C-alpha cells in the first residue's frame, strides 16, 4: 500500500511547520520583539501585565488589596458575593482587565491573531490551577452563529481546545448554545447586562446526555469577566441541565 494523498499533505505540512519554527525566531506575544522562548512575552511586556494573585475572593476571584492578617486564609468572600452568591461556584482570571490585557484580547478576538492562543492558554492553565484536578469537561462561552461567521472563529473555543490539550480534560463546543444574539455588553450597567443575557443561552439536551453533563464538574471559558452576568447566565443554564459544579476561567477580569 502506498501513502495516501492526505498523508502526504500532512507530512508536507509537518515538515513546513518544522521549517518555519527553525527559520523564524520566537517572538514576544506583546510587542513582537524576538525572544528566547516560544509563546512567551518579553521582560518589558511582562512588567506591563497585571497578573492576579492571592488573596482573592474564594468565589468570584476578586483580588483583595491586602491580606488582612486577622482574616487571612481560604474561603473569604468579597462584599458582592456575600450579598448574593453567583450561580457559578468559582471564577478565576489571569489578568486584571486594563489597557495592556485589553490589547491582547482585542488582537486575539478581532485581529486574527490566533497565534496568541498558546500564550493565553498558558496563563489560563495557571489561573485555573485549583480546578483541573477534579474537572470533567471544559466548555467555551458560545458566540451567536452570525457573530461566529463574521469572526470566523470563537476565541473561547480556541482557548478551550488548547486547555483541553494541556490538561487532558475533554472539551465540547456546541452543548452550550447561544440562542439569540445579544447586544454588545460594553457600556451597559449590571442590571442591563443581566437583562440582556437572560435567556440568551441554552443547552442541547441530546448532546448533554451523550457527554454526561448531568453531575459533571464544568470549567467554563470566556475572555473577560466584567459584572459576571454572562458567566452567571451560562452557569444557571448548565446547572438547570444537571451540571453539579461550574467554575469559570477568563483571561482578564474587571477590578474596580
Ligand atoms: Zn514584548
Ligand atoms: Zn466575590
Image (cartoon, rainbow, N blue to C red):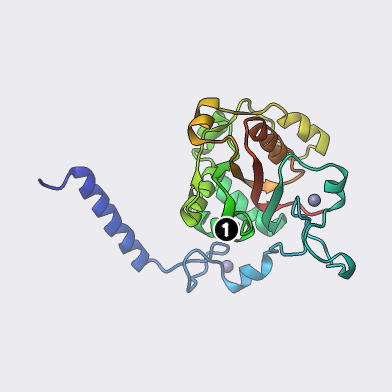
Q: Which of 22 and 83 is in front in this view?
A: 83
Q: Mark 1 points at which residue?
A: 125
Give the x, y percent position of residue 251. 63, 53
Dot 1, how many residues are within 10 Å of its Cα: few (below 14), some (14-19), or many (20+)?
some
In what quadrant does ligand 1 lie? bottom right
Residue drawn at (88%, 44%), measured in percent from left and top? Answer: 83
Q: State whether residue 231 is above or below residue 162.
A: above
Tell me if residue 84 can be seen. Answer: yes
**Image position of 204 (left or right of 21):** right
Tell me if residue 189 can be seen. Answer: no
Residue drawn at (74%, 30%), measured in percent from left and top? Answer: 196
Q: Residue furthest left?
A: 1
Quarter that holds the N terminus: top left
Give the x, y percent position of residue 140. 57, 42
Q: State whether residue 107 is above or below residue 154.
A: below
Q: Nearer the viewer, residue 217 or 188?
A: 217
Residue drawn at (51%, 38%), measured in percent from left and top? Answer: 173
Q: Nearer the viewer, residue 210 or 118?
A: 210
Residue drawn at (62%, 37%), measured in percent from left and top? Answer: 243
Q: State whether residue 188 is above or below residue 133.
A: above
Q: What element carries label 1?
A: helix
**Image position of 8 (left or right of 184):** left
Give the x, y percent position of residue 116. 52, 55
Q: Which of 182 and 83 is in front in this view?
A: 83
Query: Toward which corner of the image does residue 216 lie, by quadrant?
Result: top right
Tell me if the residue at label 1 has its CB under 8 Å from ligand 1: no
Amino acid at each position: 500500500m502506498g501513502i495516501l494523498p492526505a498523508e502526504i499533505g500532512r507530512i508536507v505540512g509537518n515538515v513546513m511547520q518544522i521549517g518555519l519554527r527553525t527559520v523564524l525566531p520566537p517572538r514576544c506575544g506583546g510587542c513582537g520583539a524576538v525572544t528566547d522562548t516560544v509563546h512567551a512575552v518579553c521582560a518589558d511586556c511582562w512588567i506591563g501585565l497585571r497578573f492576579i494573585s492571592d488573596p482573592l475572593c474564594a468565589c468570584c476571584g476578586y483580588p483583595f488589596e491586602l491580606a488582612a492578617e486577622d482574616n487571612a486564609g481560604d474561603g473569604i468572600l468579597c462584599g458582592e458575593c456575600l450579598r448574593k452568591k453567583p450561580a457559578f461556584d468559582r471564577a478565576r482570571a489571569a489578568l486584571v482587565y486594563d489597557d495592556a490585557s485589553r490589547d491582547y484580547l482585542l488582537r486575539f478576538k478581532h485581529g486574527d491573531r490566533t497565534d496568541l492562543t498558546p500564550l493565553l492558554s498558558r496563563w489560563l492553565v495557571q489561573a485555573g490551577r485549583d480546578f483541573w484536578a477534579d474537572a470533567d469537561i471544559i466548555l467555551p462561552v458560545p458566540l451567536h452563529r452570525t457573530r461566529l461567521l463574521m469572526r470566523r472563529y470563537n476565541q473561547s473555543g480556541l482557548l478551550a481546545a488548547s486547555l483541553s490539550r494541556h490538561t487532558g480534560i475533554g472539551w465540547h463546543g456546541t452543548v452550550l448554545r447561544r440562542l439569540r444574539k445579544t447586544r454588545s455588553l460594553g457600556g451597559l450597567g449590571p442590571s442591563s447586562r443581566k437583562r440582556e443575557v437572560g435567556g440568551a443561552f441554552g443547552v442541547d439536551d441530546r448532546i448533554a446526555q451523550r457527554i454526561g453533563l448531568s453531575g459533571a464538574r464544568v470549567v467554563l471559558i470566556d475572555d473577560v469577566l466584567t459584572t459576571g452576568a454572562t458567566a452567571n447566565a451560562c452557569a444557571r443554564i448548565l446547572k438547570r441541565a444537571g451540571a453539579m459544579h461550574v467554575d469559570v476561567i477568563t483571561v482578564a477580569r474587571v477590578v474596580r
